[in-house]
Image: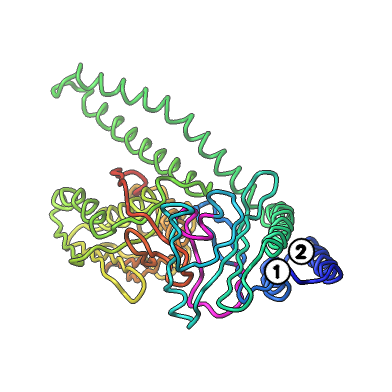
Amino acid sequence: MPENKSYSDALAISEEFFELYDRMIGSVDIPTVLQEVADVVCKDINSQRASVYLVKKDTNELEAVAVTGKVAKIIRIPIAKTSLAGFCAATGQSFVIPDAYGDLSVIDPQLRFDHTWDKINDFRTKDVMCAPAVFKGELLGVVQGINSKGEPFGGHDLESLKSVSRLVGYSLYHARLYNDLATMKELEKQKAEFVRVMVHELKSPISGARMLISALEQIQGEDSQAAGMTRKVGARMDHMLDLITDMLEFAKVKSGEPMGEITVVDVTECTKKICTRYVSDAEQKNLGIDTAFPDSPLGVRIDTRGYEMVVSNLLSNAIKYTTEGAVKFSLSQQDSMIKLAVTDTGIGIPEKDIPKLFKEFYRASNAKSQQIPGSGVGLSGVKSIVERFGGRLELESKENVGSTFYVYLPISEIGGGGEAATGVGVFESDKSQTTDKSFTK
């Protein structure tokens, strides 16, 4: 609200806020109502453009659900001190930036403004204000206003924006409770936690029994009449432990909690390392394995552990379900996405099974008839991870000919400037990568 607005104008704005609140708590269509919030910020708080961001816990990001003005794509911003809205979310501070193109290091050395959004939309950002939407100490979102000209934001404008953000936080909290009940999301999380606890309890006694079998194998020796039976029991237990590991990983994916560090990964280098570990598996089955990678790094913002699970699952499945021929793996850039393709010459998937293949615990009929071991949770987990980070999973397959799985994930700039649509998103480079071959059945 500009400094020269009258007391009656202030009351009129307050009344509009209360009307907006009434609509928010009485509506299940929260995105539509939040768009009205953005419109109010523009109309009554002297802002040319406005955005309302919501927190995505599973990817540690802000996602714009309401934006005034045109945008090139869905706006996602990491919650970090490397962008304006991200800084607001990370610190919980409300602020006004008088010159977005100025020296922001006086506020924080990591803070910067990416002007890509301005170039795309022919807009010159001048002053920016942000306020966090918080309720009961929990960050739920960020409300942002932007100007390019005219009267700059003042103290009253920021106070008005803070009032809007408090309204948004309160309403989102109650809307989320309603949504959890309506969509059974909370029950899904509880189910995943129950599975995790139950399967974890199974793992300890089976691991202990496997150790006893290993000890018996050493005592009996190769010539013992019981040695063959002992080895079979050990192999069955190994298979059971693999299934338990898969179930534990799957439960963690379904719970929505991050599995590793969420950062920008150089998938070129990371994927090469993962593929190397599967060369010997292919050679043991006399299969050729061909790989193709780009010469330059490709960045993807993803859960590092989750990405490894995606690649490991697809590669190990391709080798497991192929008895002769070859497995091909390629990584490339396609427009603004990375494209990962895994092709095999294996048993393929019956056409009737393809629509159900990505459902949890479902296995193709020919895999079951040929008694190829597996839990049926791997591809469901892969799909969840890929879609969580804005990607998609596609499949082409023909029974007795082979299959090709395609993974598409949005590219992010390694080391900064990762959100072209916003002008505010900056990512950090990858700091660590895990190496684990579990969750591959």
Task: Compare residues 357 and 154 and report the one nearer the observer.
Answer: 154
Q: Is residue 71 magenta?
A: yes
Mark in the foreground, 2 or 1? 1
Pointer 2 residue? 24
Query: What span is colored magenta in the figure?
Result: 65-87
In this view, 421 is above or below 78: below
**What amino acid type is highlighted by mark number 2?**
Met
Task: Compare residues 441 and 92 and report the one nearer the observer.
Answer: 92
Task: Compare residues 402 and 172 and report the one nearer the observer.
Answer: 172
Q: Is residue 377 left or right of residue 175?
A: left
Which residue sits furthest bottom?
122
Q: Residue at x 61, y 57 (%)?
A: 141
Which residue sits furthest top?
219
Q: Residue at x 55, y 66 (%)?
A: 98
Res 163 quadrant in image: bottom right
Q: For the residue carrying disc 2, how many other residues have a C-alpha within 10 Å: few (<14), some (14-19), or many (20+)? A: many
Task: Compare residues 155 and 229 and report the one nearer the observer.
Answer: 155
- Mark 1 residue element: helix
Give me the disc on residue 238.
Answer: none
Mark 2 → mark 1, Cα distance in angstroms = 10 Å
* x and y, in percent, of residue 335 in the image: 34, 76
- Return the disc, 2 or 1, that comes first in the chain's sequence: 2
Q: Residue at x 23, y 56 (%)?
A: 269
Q: Are marks 2 and 1 in contact (CB under 8 Å)?
A: yes
Res 54 quadrant in image: bottom right
